[in-house]
Amino acid sequence: MSFFLFSLLAAATATPDYYSADQFKQDCSDIGRIDGCFAFVSAVSDTSRAYQQWMNFREYCLPAGVMRGDLRDATLRYLDLHPREGDALAASVVILALKDRYPCAADPAPAVPATPAK
């Protein structure tokens, strides 16, 4: 069974059949495909935010007023800084880029009770 899984993994890395971060970057720089670029980054962000609400955790925290262009720019900037991520799934790279650009503020430390609990 492990040989079968290894074979699938090797085949997946040899011929990617997914939307790669490099393809995303290429589409975002092609004026004829720019709408698809915006739609993709918006869909990934919206899906991730819905999942975060469902699971009650936060991967990143978008400030009010963030536009689709900001999401795209954050992802393209992340790819410029991490060119090895080009072969990765574009959706994963969008999430990594948003986590990097829009981190959540650290939760404040829990208050120490004034009196010991009994």
Image (tube, rainbow, N blue to C red):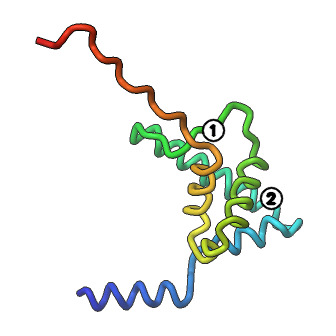
Q: SS class of the residue under badge 2?
A: helix
Name the spot of residue 48 as percent of width and height, x first: 53, 48
Q: Which amino acid type is marked by label 1?
A: Leu
Residue reaching furthest to the top: 115
Residue appearing at x 32%, y 84% in the figure: 5
Q: On screen, 106 above or below 70?
A: above
Residue appearing at x 79%, y 65% in the figure: 28
Name the spot of residue 10 as percent of width and height, x first: 44, 89
Q: 50 or 106, which lies in front? A: 106
Horizontally, residue 39 falls left or right of residue 58, namely right
Residue occupied by mark 2: 35
Q: Residues within 10 Å of mark 1 (few under 14, many from 20)?
A: some
Whichever of labels 2 and 1 marks the residue nearer the N terminus, that label is 2
Residue reaching furthest to the left: 118
Q: Quadrant of residue 32?
A: bottom right
Is residue 19 visible in the rendered image? The answer is no
Residue appearing at x 10%, y 11% in the figure: 118
Q: 54 or 95, which lies in front? A: 95
Q: Which amino acid type is marked by label 2?
A: Asp
The label on residue 62 is 1
Name the spot of residue 11 as percent of width and height, x first: 46, 90
Residue appearing at x 89%, y 65% in the figure: 31
Is residue 87 visible in the rendered image? The answer is yes
Q: 100 or 64, which lies in front? A: 100
Name the spot of residue 110 as percent of width and height, x first: 35, 23
